[in-house]
Each structure stands twice: as structure tokens, then as C-alpha cells.
Image: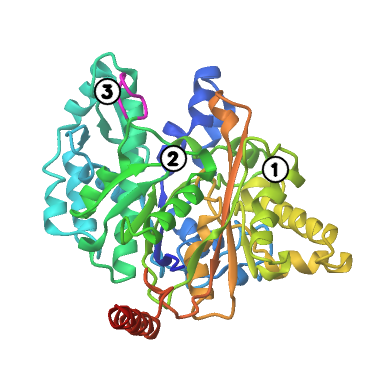
Amino acid sequence: MSYAVVRGAGYVLVYTPDMILHNGTTQTTERLANPDSEYLKKVPENTRSFEQVINYAPNQVYIGNLTPEELRSYEMPWYDRDVANADRFGRFGEIMPQDEFIGMMKMSDAFDLVKLDKAFITSVKEKLAKHPLFTEAELAALKEGEDLSEIEKFIHEQHAEALYHENKLVGCVKRAHDIDSNLNAHVLFENLVVKASGVLAFKHLIEKNNIDIKDIDYVIECSEEACGDMNQRGGGNFAKAIAEVVGAANATGSDTRGFCAAPTHALIQAAALVQSGVYNNVVLVAGGATAKLGMNGKDHVKKGMPILEDTLGGFAILVSKNDGVNPVLRTDLVGRHTVGTGSSPQAVITALITAPLDKGGLKITDIDKYSVEMQNPDVTKPAGAGDVPEANYKMIAALGVKRNELDRKDLAGFVEKHGMPGWAPTQGHIPSGVPYVGFAREDLTEGSLNRAMIVGKGSLFLGRMTNQFDGVSIVMERNNGKVETKDAAVSQEQVKSFIAEAMRDFASHLLGE
């Protein structure tokens, strides 16, 4: 069986301080419930600078400048200690500032819904012209901009969504329909953010891995947003919209949704599509969610911390035919939380971890690294949610003890050896499994590891259609260097032998007559 491989990955963060206050769900609902909120007054003074965001250790891990193992050497909490020689750009992607990203929203806008101030556009054009990923043709999409008075008119008279930078109005996103709530300005703003951040991640995937954009056949978009109109709320298609902007002219695509688990679903789908021969190169991509900005902000402010959920997250991963080099995706070792699994921790871990391992005759300790819900504990612990990755690793280790695959005295050692500290931003779909894929590709080729498991979990009950939990997993494995073909089951020598035998039989038949 010739498995598909992970050929490359791109990861981006977008620093969006003004969007915390104006677009994060925690803040916008607080404004509705309590317009004079003391918390809202404290948001600006508890917002980090761009330099602080760059110098933050988990962010440097996300874009590839630090490894997960190196993150262990930084004493927690991480937010009050800087990384030496931190950089905006990393080997997987970058951390983009807010003004450049607003420019990207305009460049990704197909219906002229984003209106930006003339002076702001002039400033952004100069910055993006120096960026390594953008062409003159893309910069031309920024156009010349609007008078600020015209933008204010769109906001006050047509319910446009305001865009701010450094606490100043710099533009807006217009609605696309007078009465369709699915095409109102707020929804279109969120969707353009997903699209633009997905485009940025896709561009880094292509550039960092020397990929020919013409070779991309299919795109799967797996964020948590949905685009459509009143006749089909989530009809899509973010995938083709993103592919169009990055210039993937030979690609088609579709959207996959499954709350936090969607990216791992998409990874399995991509592997199956490539392995079956339907497509040769499939990209899974996801942009960020503004609703999650400052989600735990109240708890952070109460504890005198900066609001750490100040970045959007995005990623793109390329799955291709087996090249004999890159790690394979073992589609025969897929874990799945079924309708009948149940929601107890033991039932979930059994379905996602041990069930697929049993198929391959593997023990829990045969997986070198587990990538679970890689939530940043700097964010979650002050909010009372604890250290999410560590809790997952402890449950896996406990099941290993129950299965007699691990000694009880080795529980703590298992967490350190087979686990990792969390570094992913709180962006719903971003933390679950996929942040490690870029590192896993390196660890399973240049490094010493042989197997990793990517685990995605999701909370389907949030949609109020079911109380079901969700989850899937897949094993990534070091490539053995053997690239099998569809005819690999029969060797060339066997074919020659079959032909010779058939000819002898035929000759004997003729002589017998």
C-alpha cells in the first residue's frame, strides 16, 4: 500500500489588538450587556505591543523559530519573559502586524466590500511592497482608497463593520445585502478575516517548501466559520476562494467543518484522496477566527495579565503522493470517536488512541510523540481550564498502565517523553493536533523519531444539533523509502514468469491437439 505523505506546512499568526476590543465575542457581548464595563475600559491598557507578541515564546514555536522541546526550558508563566533574538519571520511562516493584515483583507476582497482610508492605504502599500510574498499585481488590488467621511457614512447609514488600527478608524467592511443576515457586514468581516489569514498561510506553505502552485489539485478549507447566503448559510466555498487568491489555477476544493476536530478530519481526507489516486497534491488550509480574540480576557485582566489571545491563527499543509522521503500518513491506523463511543475520558482515549494502535499491533509507547489539544497553558490556566495538553497526556499514560504497557512509576516520564508543552493560540480549530505537523515532518525525516499521532477533538454540542463529542486521529510514520505503485503486488520478474508459464501451457495445448 502506497501511503500519502506530508510534504510541507505553513503557519501564521496575525497580531490584531484593535479587533480584540471591537470584534472578539467576549468583548462585544460585554458591551451589549454592560456598556459601562470596567473590563472594557481596561482592555487597551492590557493589550500587548507587536514587539511583545513577537518575543513571546509560544508564538516563536508556532512559526518554527523554537521547537516544542526548547519551550520546556522557559519557566512559566511565559508572557513576562522575552525570547532572545526573536523574529517576525520563522521557518514555517510569520507573525503579521494588524495594518498589513487589513491590507490583505482588501487584497482578498472579490466584491469591493472593504473600504480603506486613503492615507492608511498609502502607508500599508509601502509596507507590503517590502514583504517577500506579494506581487505588484496583488498590491494594485488595494487601489487608492476612500475619504474617511465616506467610510463613516457607510458605517452610520449602511451598518458597515468598522475597521480600526491604533484606536483610529481606518476603514470598514460593507454589507452585501440589505436584509440577509448571512451577508451582513459583521459576518462578511469574519469571513474575509478567515479568507485573508488562510491566504497568508497558503502563501507561506508554497514559498517555504518550494512548491509549484500549478501542481495543487485540491484544497480543503477546515476553519470554524461558514460562508453562504439566506438560502444556504454554510454553502461555502472558502477553499476555492483562497485557492483563487494564491493563484492555484488548477485546483478545485471544498470546505470541511467539525468544530475543533475539522483539521484532523481534513488531514485524513487529504491522505485518502491522494492515496486513492484521485488527486496528487491536496492542501488543507484554515484561517483565523476573530470571535475567539480575548475569549479569556476577563480572567487575564483580573489576574493583572495582558490579554494573551491577541492573535489570529492560520495554517496550511500539503499532502502529496509518496516520494520515499517525507513521513507517511497511515490511513490504516485511524482512530475515530463513533456515535456509540460515549463521552467518558477512558472511552474517548480508547477510541482515538488505543483502537488504531491495536490495528497495527502497536503499544502506547510505540508512538514517539502525541499531538493532542496543544492549547497554550499560559492562556488556559489563569482561566481555570488547567493545562490541557498535560491532562491529555496523563490520560494516555494512565491507559498505558491499565494495559500493562507502562509501569506506574513511569507516568511522569511518559508525559515528558511522549508529550509536549502547549503553544497554540486559542483559535478553536487551530490547537487540535495540527500545530505539530510541521515539526513532525522534520522529526520523522531529519530527526530520530519514527511515529507521531495527530489527534483532533471537537465539541459538536456547541451547534445545538447533538450532544455528541467528536474526535479522529491518524499516525504519521517515518518513510521506509519504498515507493509502491498500483502494480507493486506483482514484480516484473513475476510478470515474466507468468507470461512464460502461459506460453508453455498454450504450446502444450496446441501439441496435444
Q: Residue at x 51, y 24 (%)?
A: 29
The numbered mark, 1 or 2, whose residue comes first in the sequence reads 2
Q: Residue 173's spot in the image, x, y percent?
A: 27, 31
The numbered mark, 2 or 3, whose residue comes first in the sequence reads 3
* Position of 324 relative to 346 (above/below): below
Q: Which residue is mark 1?
A: 385
Q: CA distance from mark 2 to mark 3?
A: 22 Å
Q: Residue 322's spot in the image, x, y percent?
A: 39, 71
**Location of residue 493 by image quarter:** bottom left
Tell me the element at label 1: loop
Indicate yes or no whether the magenta region holds residue 472: no
Q: Which residue occupies the foreground of this view, 290 or 346?
A: 346
Q: Does residue 30 appear left or right of residue 385 in this picture?
A: left
Q: Residue at x 43, y 51 (%)?
A: 269
- Asked if the residue under mark 1 is in contact with the one under mark 3, i.e. CB atoms within 8 Å, the reply is no
Q: Which residue occupies the foreground of this view, 138 or 438?
A: 438
The numbered mark, 3 or 1, whose residue comes first in the sequence reads 3
Q: Nearer the viewer, mark 2 or mark 3?
A: 2
- Asked if the residue under mark 3 is in contact with the one under mark 2, i.e. CB atoms within 8 Å, the reply is no
Q: Which residue is mark 3?
A: 155
Indicate yes or no whether the magenta region holds residue 232: yes
**Location of residue 402 by image quarter:** bottom right
* Position of 226 relative to 29 (above/below): below
Q: Which residue is mark 2?
A: 289
Which range is magenta? Answer: 228-234
User: Looking at the rendering, in which quadrant would you find the C terminus?
Assistant: bottom left
* Position of 55 relative to 15 (above/below): below
